Amino acid sequence: AKMLNAVSNSDVPTITIMIGASYGAGNYAMNGRAYQPRFLFSYPNSKIAVMGPQQLSGVMEIIQRSAAKKAGIEYDEEQAIQLRQYMIQQVEKSSTAWYATSQGWDDGVIDPRETRNY
C-alpha cells in the first residue's frame, strides 16, 4: 500500500522499465502506463497482459462451465481443451514486448545493456 501511495502521489517525473512479467494490478503498482510515467520502456523478454495465459484460460473455463450448467447443457471437455490451448496461444502472442510496443503501450523496446543510456 505504501508503494502504491508513493507512486500515485509522486510529483517528480518517473521512468518505468518493464523487465519481466507485468500482469494486472502489479502493472499499476509498479508505475504502469495508468500512472503516466514520463517514459515506459520494455526489455525484449518482458510481457504485459491483464493476467498470465494459464490464469486467463482457467478463468474462461470456469465461466464457460458455469454458463453450460445454468443452460442445462453438457460441458464438452474436448472442446474445452482446444479452447484453453487456443486462449493460451493468443495471450502468449499478444503479451510480448514486441506486440506491446506495436500497440503503443510503451515507448519502445530497449536492449538491457543500453538501459543507462536512457
Image (cartoon, rainbow, N blue to C red):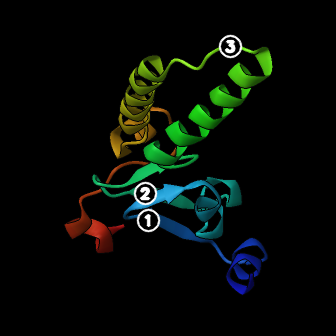
* Residue 12 percent across, percent down from the top left: 67, 77
Q: Amino acid type of disc 2? A: Phe
* Residue 118 percent across, percent down from the top left: 37, 67
C-alpha distance separating marks 3 and 2: 47 Å
- Going from N to C along the chain, the mark reached first, 1 or 3, is 1
48 or 89: nearer the viewer: 89
Q: Going 77% across and 15% down the picture, which residue do you hit?
A: 71
Residue count near mark 3 (Cα–Cα under 10 Å), binned few <14, some 14–19, many ≥20: few
Residue count near mark 2 (Cα–Cα under 10 Å), binned few <14, some 14–19, many ≥20: many
The disc placed on residue 17 is: 1
20 or 9: nearer the viewer: 20
Residue count near mark 1 (Cα–Cα under 10 Å), binned few <14, some 14–19, many ≥20: many
Q: Amino acid type of disc 3? A: Ile
Give the residue number, with chain letter if any, for mark 3.
73
SS for callout 3: loop
Q: Going 49% across and 58% down the picture, which residue do you hit?
A: 22
44 or 116: nearer the viewer: 44
- Going from N to C along the chain, the mark reached first, 3 or 2, is 2
C-alpha distance separating marks 1 and 3: 47 Å
Q: Going 79% across and 76% down the picture, which residue do you hit?
A: 9
* Residue 36 percent across, percent down from the top left: 67, 58
SS for callout 2: strand
- Going from N to C along the chain, the mark reached first, 2 or 1, is 1
Is residue 106 visible in the rendered image? The answer is no
C-alpha distance separating marks 2 and 1: 5 Å
Please identify the quarter of the rendering in which residue 59 is found.
top right
Q: Residue furthest left?
A: 113
Do the CB atoms of the residues marked 2 and 1 lie less than 8 Å apart?
A: yes
In the image, residue 97 sits, relative to residue 63, either above or below, namely: below
Is residue 118 visible in the rendered image? The answer is yes
Give the residue number, with chain letter if any, for mark 2.
41
* Residue 86 percent across, percent down from the top left: 40, 24
